[in-house]
Image (cartoon, grey):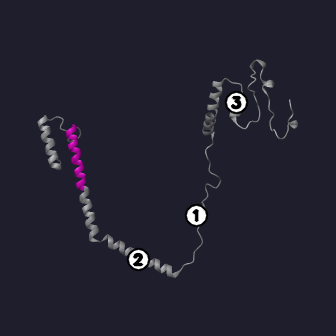
C-alpha cells in the first residue's frame, strides 16, 4: 500500500488497475477497472468490465438517478438571519427641496382635474348612457333566459321541458316560446 505522503501532488488519487483488484478469471483485457479520481461518471462506467447491454443501461440511468436524488434530497431554501428585518424600502428617502412654482402648478392641476371629474359625473350624457346600459343589461338577460328555455323545451330538459306533453302540444308550446322570444 502506498502511503499518502508518497503520492505525487499532480495526481490526487492513485489509479489502480484491474490486475490488483479483480481476480484473473474475471479480467477483461479490453477494459480496465480504474478506481480513483475520474473527471466524469461515464468515463468511470466505461472502465468497469460489464456486458454491453448492462453498460448502456447504466450509462443512461446513472444521470437520471443522480438528478432525481438531487431533487429529492435537496434542502428547502431557508430565510437568512435578516428575513425578519424591514428592507431598504422602509427607510424614508431624503427630503427633496420644495419649489414653490411646481407646488402651485400641481395644486392648480389637481383642482382642475377634480372639477372636470365632477362635471363629467353629473353630465346628462353620462346619466343617459348609464340608464341605457341598465336597460340593455335587463333585455340581454331576458333574451338569454328565453333562448335557454326554448333549448330546454326542444331537448326535454330543465324548467321549460315539454317531456310529459303530446307531440302536438309540445310543438305548440315550443312555437309559443319562440314567438314570445321573437325567434323564427
Q: Residue furthest bottom?
A: 101
Question: Mark 1 — residue?
Answer: 90
**As displayed, is residue 35 above or below residue 78?**
above
The percent position of residue 140, horizontal first and vertical second, equals 24, 53
- Nearer-N-terminus badge (2/1): 1
Residue 9 lies in what quarter of the image?
top right
Q: Residue at horizontal 14%, vertical 48%?
A: 179
Q: Is residue 120 left or right of residue 29?
A: left
**As displayed, is residue 26 above or below residue 57?**
above
- Magenta-tinted stretch: 138-156
**As displayed, is residue 88 above or below residue 79?**
below
Count the numbered circles shown: 3
Element carrying mark 3: helix
Question: Mark 3 — residue?
Answer: 46
Label annotation for residue 159: none
The percent position of residue 155, horizontal first and vertical second, equals 22, 38
- Nearer-N-terminus badge (3/2): 3
Alpha carbon distance from label 3 to label 1: 58 Å
Quadrant location of the N terminus in the rendered image: top right
- Nearer-N-terminus badge (3/1): 3
Question: Mark 2 — residue?
Answer: 111
The percent position of residue 139, horizontal first and vertical second, equals 22, 55
**As displayed, is residue 178 above or below residue 114?**
above
Whether the residues at callouts 2 and 1 have beta carbons within 8 Å, the answer is no
Instruction: Choose mark 3 or mark 2, whichever is in front.
Output: 3
User: Dot 2, how many residues are within 10 Å of its Cα: few (below 14), some (14-19), or many (20+)?
Assistant: few
Instruction: Choose mark 3 or mark 1, whichever is in front.
Output: 3
Alpha carbon distance from label 2 to label 1: 31 Å
Q: Is residue 142 left or right of residue 64?
A: left
The residue lying toward the viewer, choosing from 82 and 67, is: 67
Q: Is residue 173 left or right of residue 126?
A: left
Amino acid at each position: 500500500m502506498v502511503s499518502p505522503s508518497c503520492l505525487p501532488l499532480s495526481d490526487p488519487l492513485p489509479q489502480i488497475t484491474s490486475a490488483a483488484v479483480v481476480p484473473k478469471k474475471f479480467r477483461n483485457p479490453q477494459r480496465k477497472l480504474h478506481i480513483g479520481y475520474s473527471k466524469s461518471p461515464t468515463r468511470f462506467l466505461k472502465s468497469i468490465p460489464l456486458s454491453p447491454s448492462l453498460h448502456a443501461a447504466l450509462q443512461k440511468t446513472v444521470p437520471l438517478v443522480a438528478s432525481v436524488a438531487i431533487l429529492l434530497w435537496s434542502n428547502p431554501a431557508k430565510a437568512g438571519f435578516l428575513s425578519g428585518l424591514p428592507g431598504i424600502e422602509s427607510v424614508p428617502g431624503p427630503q427633496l427641496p420644495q419649489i414653490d412654482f411646481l407646488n402651485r402648478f400641481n395644486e392648480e392641476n389637481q383642482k382642475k382635474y377634480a372639477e372636470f371629474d365632477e362635471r363629467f359625473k353629473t353630465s346628462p350624457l353620462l346619466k343617459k348612457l348609464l340608464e341605457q346600459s341598465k336597460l340593455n343589461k335587463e333585455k340581454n338577460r331576458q333574451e338569454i333566459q328565453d333562448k335557454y328555455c326554448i333549448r330546454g323545451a326542444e331537448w326535454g330538459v330543465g324548467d321549460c321541458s315539454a317531456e310529459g306533453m303530446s307531440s302536438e302540444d309540445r310543438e305548440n308550446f315550443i312555437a309559443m316560446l319562440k314567438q314570445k322570444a321573437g325567434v323564427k
